[in-house]
Image: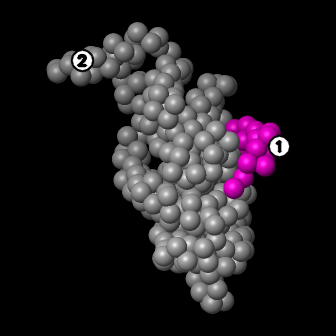
Amino acid sequence: MMLVLPLLCFFLALLFGRYGASPLETIKAFYNWLMPQHEPSTLENVIFTIRLPRVATAMLIGGGLSVSGACFQGIFRNPLVSPFILGVATGAGFGAAMAILLSGNGLVIQGAAFLFGMLAVALSYGMTRIYRTSSMLVMTLSGVIVGTFFSALISLVKYVADPYDKLPVIVFWLMGSLATISQKDFLTIIVPITLGITVIFSLRWKINVLSMGEEEARSLGLHSTWLTILLIMSATLITASAVAVSGVIGWVGLVIPHLARMIGGPDYRRLIPLSMSLGACYLLLIDTLARNLVGGEVPLGILTATVGAPFFAVILKKGSLGWS
């Protein structure tokens, strides 16, 4: 399931769009693409220049956010934690809003979103050090404080932005979208997201120990503090990189780990790869709907919330007793 389902979704997503293609035409386009000195057709240009980078980016971001959410839920031992718990989304959103207001350059927007997302986590963790405690509750509350602070700054940026030029761009970006994704955007985020996923994947069995509590982890010989910092930074790297190119896409990192937990159980050795597979398919499905439902693009943040909220309510009712 983890291998076949993403491949199937990947192929099917290439078929749908304003310029439709049959399965046979898509397979033929891939064959022709591999041939040397071949003049690409209109369909091949659509698939490889526009559709393929967007599909690949949607799967990468969906899988990354799901892995990040599952990691955070295990570290904080809280089923309601998402990748945005430490203020990553609002910090990155503020950085992007500032870059749009002052520059508008795509690389500047991505860089500012990433830097301020990492800054938000540093502030959240720094507050726990000020209070001289490593309590997960204090760290969570610190994330709420930092997130609220950056939300206020975002509102300030909106207030001073030109309502006819900059403000619509900021508002639309904060809703989340993959409408302008290119091959360059995909190459920008593939390294940091892959690095973060690799670290979490290689340490996934240790999350089982961390989820039992700090005292139990220390009694089993784990350096829980440094391990927690490493996992948080890896999950934050994934989230900040995703927000840097796609805007704020909520609910993926909250809903998908619960669904994976219902299917594969609470063991993080299975939960992490299953979350990655389901998250990639889920966001790809949402993005396919976003570009085919109506004549214009529907922001992903709207669809993920519209689909995710009732879906989350259902799986909580069915699987609330399975949390571990």
Classify residue 249 as left or right of residue 10: right
- In the image, 101 versus 185, the foreground residue is 185
Q: Amino acid at mark 1?
A: Lys
Residue 138 x %, y %: 70, 78
Label 1: state its secondary structure.
helix
Q: Quadrant of the C terminus?
A: bottom right
Question: Where is 74 relative to 302, above or below?
Answer: below
Q: Residue at x 62, y 34 (%)?
A: 286
User: Local crowd at mark 2 within 10 Å, few (<14), some, or many (≥20)?
Assistant: few
Residue 145 x %, y %: 71, 74
Q: Which residues are magenta?
A: 299-324
Q: Amino acid at mark 2?
A: Glu
User: Local crowd at mark 1 within 10 Å, few (<14), some, or many (≥20)?
Assistant: few
Classify residue 281 as left or right of residue 30: right
Label 2: state its secondary structure.
loop
- In the image, 106 versus 79, the foreground residue is 79
Residue 279 x %, y %: 57, 41
Q: Nearer the viewer, mark 2 or mark 1?
A: 1
Mark 2 vs 1, N-terminal side = 2
Residue beneath disc 1: 317
Residue beneath disc 2: 39
Q: Residue at x 60, y 73 (%)?
A: 216
Query: Is residue 88 in sight in this rendering?
Result: no
